Image (cartoon, rainbow, N blue to C red):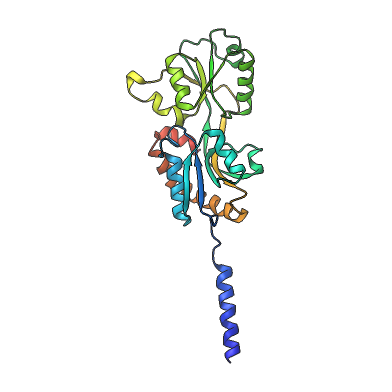
C-alpha cells in the first residue's frame, strides 16, 4: 500500500512538473540594450522601454541590466552574447543568424524634402546639383533606399548625421535638403511649436519603403521555446490594445495607426 502510494505521489509530481510552464526568460535575467531614437528611446524613456518593462512584468522576468549604447554597438553585443535583448531592429537576414526578431511595428520610411526642392523622382534627385541628402550613420533603410544612398554617395551628395535628431536638425537648418525618416521620428518635429517646426514635403516614391521593427532575442540567451512565448505575448498585447496604449503615450493617433497596420 505504501509503495503504491509513493508511486502515485511520484507520478503526480512528474505530471505537475511536465505541465508547469518553462521559464520565459534566460536564467541570468534580461540584459537589454537600447540605442537613442526619437520617441522609442530618449534618456531612459520611450515606448521601447515601456514595451520591454510590460513584457517582463507579464512573463515574470527579471531585468538584470538595461543600458544605452550607440546603434551599431547594440547588435554587436547581442551577436557576441553580451546582451540578450534589444529593440527597434529591422529583421535583416544577416541578423537572423544570431537572433530572432519579433516585429511589433511596421513603419514607412518616408522621404522628407525641403519645400524649395523642385525635382520629384530619385533619378531627378541624383542629377540635382543643389540637393544634399542626409543619412544616419549605421542605419539600414529599405534595399532600394540604401541603393539610392550609395548612388548619392558616389555623386558626393551624401552627408552623415550622428542620429535621427541630428538628421532632422540638419534638415531644418538647411545643411541638407532631403532625408529618409519614419513618422514616429519626425512626428513631433512636424507638429511642434510653430517657431521650431520642421517644414518639409513628405513623399513616398520608393516601392519598398515599408519596414518592420522588432524585438531582438539572442540565440545565445533564449531557447526557441522561450522565443515563442515572447512572440505569443507580444501578439496578445497587440490584440488587447496594450501595445496601442504604449505607443499612443508618445505619438499621434495617425502615427500609431500606421505603425500597427
Please name the residue shown 49% across and 51% down the image.
236
Q: Residue furthest top?
A: 129
| Vertical comparison of 38 with 85: above or below | above
Mark yes or no: residue 240 visible: no
- Return the x and y of residue 240 as percentages of the image width and height: 44, 50
- Return the x and y of residue 175 as percentages of the image width and height: 47, 14
Report the label total: 0
Figure quadrant of the N terminus = bottom right
| Vertical comparison of 57 with 138: above or below | below
- Return the x and y of residue 178 as percentages of the image width and height: 51, 17
Closest to the observer, 208 or 197: 197
- Return the x and y of residue 192 as percentages of the image width and height: 35, 25
> Along the horizontal axis of the image, is 96 left or right of 260?
right
Closest to the observer, 209 or 56: 56
Please name the residue shown 61% across and 54% down the image.
223
Please name the residue shown 63% across and 20% down the image.
150
Mark yes or no: residue 110 visible: yes
Q: Quadrant of residue 193?
A: top left
Amino acid at each position: 500500500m505504501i509503495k503504491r502510494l509513493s508511486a502515485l505521489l511520484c507520478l503526480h509530481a512528474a505530471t505537475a512538473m511536465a505541465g508547469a510552464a518553462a521559464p520565459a526568460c534566460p536564467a541570468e535575467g534580461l540584459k537589454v540594450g537600447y540605442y537613442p531614437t526619437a520617441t522609442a528611446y530618449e534618456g531612459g524613456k520611450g515606448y521601447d522601454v515601456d514595451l520591454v518593462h510590460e513584457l517582463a512584468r507579464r512573463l515574470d522576468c527579471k531585468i538584470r541590466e538595461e543600458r544605452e549604447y550607440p546603434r551599431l554597438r547594440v547588435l554587436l553585443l547581442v551577436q557576441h552574447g553580451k546582451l540578450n535583448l534589444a529593440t527597434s531592429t529591422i529583421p535583416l537576414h544577416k541578423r537572423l543568424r544570431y537572433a530572432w526578431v519579433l516585429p511589433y511595428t511596421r513603419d514607412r520610411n518616408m522621404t522628407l524634402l525641403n519645400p524649395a526642392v523642385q525635382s520629384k523622382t530619385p533619378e531627378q534627385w541624383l542629377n540635382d546639383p543643389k540637393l544634399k541628402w542626409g543619412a544616419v550613420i549605421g542605419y539600414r533603410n529599405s534595399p532600394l533606399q540604401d541603393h539610392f544612398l550609395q548612388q548619392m554617395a558616389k555623386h558626393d551628395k551624401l552627408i552623415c548625421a550622428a542620429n535621427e535628431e541630428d538628421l532632422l536638425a540638419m534638415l531644418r537648418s538647411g545643411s541638407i535638403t532631403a532625408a529618409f525618416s519614419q513618422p514616429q521620428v519626425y512626428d513631433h518635429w512636424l507638429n511642434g511649436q510653430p517657431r521650431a517646426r520642421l517644414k518639409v514635403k513628405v513623399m513616398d516614391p520608393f516601392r519598398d519603403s515599408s519596414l518592420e521593427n522588432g524585438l531582438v532575442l539572442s540565440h545565445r540567451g533564449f531557447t526557441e521555446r522561450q522565443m515563442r512565448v515572447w512572440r505569443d505575448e507580444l501578439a496578445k498585447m497587440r490584440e488587447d490594445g496594450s501595445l496601442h496604449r504604449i505607443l499612443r503615450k508618445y505619438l499621434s493617433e495617425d502615427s500609431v495607426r500606421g505603425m500597427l497596420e
